Image: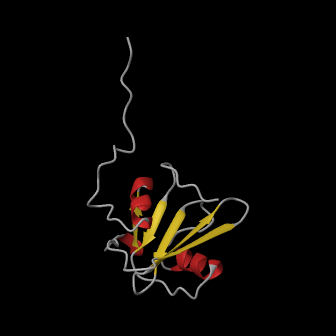
């Protein structure tokens, strides 16, 4: 099972992917177009051209996970633009919003991912 944690590296591909690709094709996209190692344990998120579906690929040290979510109605309202190497990095709470069809940039109400502890005494 894929568990998205705050420590996980999450890369979102800016350009749409051909969704006829399976795990091997998306892993090749990670290497060739995103310049990232698909075996790194990070989560790689892709969308189709019409913006109605998302695929996530992740390696968990025993094998690859491939998740596919297609909306039954409408399109994903948000998709990142720009980014270095064709990717944008998101935090765990942002990708949760993205997967539910929300806009991670509009709903930035989560606390910062890291806070320094105060010294005691």
All told, the count of numbered labels is 0
Left or right: residue 14 versus residue 8 is: left
In the image, is residue 97 above or below residue 5? Answer: below
Q: Which is nearer the eye, 46 or 101?
A: 101
Split into 4 quadrants, where in the image is the C terminus? top left
Quadrant including the N terminus: bottom right
Q: Nearer the viewer, residue 26 or 79?
A: 79
Residue at point 39%, 15% (across, down):
120
Please give left or right for residue 83 compared with residue 37 in the image.
left
Residue 40 in view:
yes
Residue 89 located left or right of residue 61: left
Residue 34 visible (yes or no): no
Front in this rendered view, residue 52 or 40 = 52
Q: State the residue at coordinates (37%, 80%).
A: 74
The residue at the point 37 percent across, 36 percent down is 115
The image quadrant of residue 64 is: bottom right
- What is the x, y in percent for residue 54? 48, 75
Residue 23 pos. (x, y %):
63, 77
47 in relation to 112, above or below? below
Residue 88 figure quarter: bottom left
Residue sitting farthest toward the left:
106
Q: How is the image coloured?
A: secondary structure
Q: Residue furthest top?
A: 121
Q: Position of residue 51 (x, y in %)?
A: 39, 81
Q: Compare residues 22 and 40 and report the one nearer the observer.
A: 22
Name the spot of residue 116 as percent of width and height, x first: 37, 32
User: Looking at the rendering, which quadrant does residue 117 occupy?
Assistant: top left
């Amino acid at each position: 099972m894929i568990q998205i944690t705050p420590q996980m590296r999450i890369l979102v591909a800016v350009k749409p992917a051909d969704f006829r690709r399976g795990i091997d094709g998306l892993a090749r996209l990670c290497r060739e177009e995103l310049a990232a190692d698909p075996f790194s344990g990070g989560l790689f998120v892709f969308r189709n051209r019409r913006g109605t579906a998302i695929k996530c690929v992740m390696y968990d040290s025993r094998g690859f996970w491939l998740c596919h979510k297609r909306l039954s109605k409408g399109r994903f309202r948000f998709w990142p633009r720009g980014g270095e190497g064709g990717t944008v990095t998101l935090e765990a709470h942002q990708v949760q919003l993205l997967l539910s069809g929300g806009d991670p940039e509009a709903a930035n109400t989560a606390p910062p991912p890291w806070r320094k502890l105060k010294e005691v005494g």
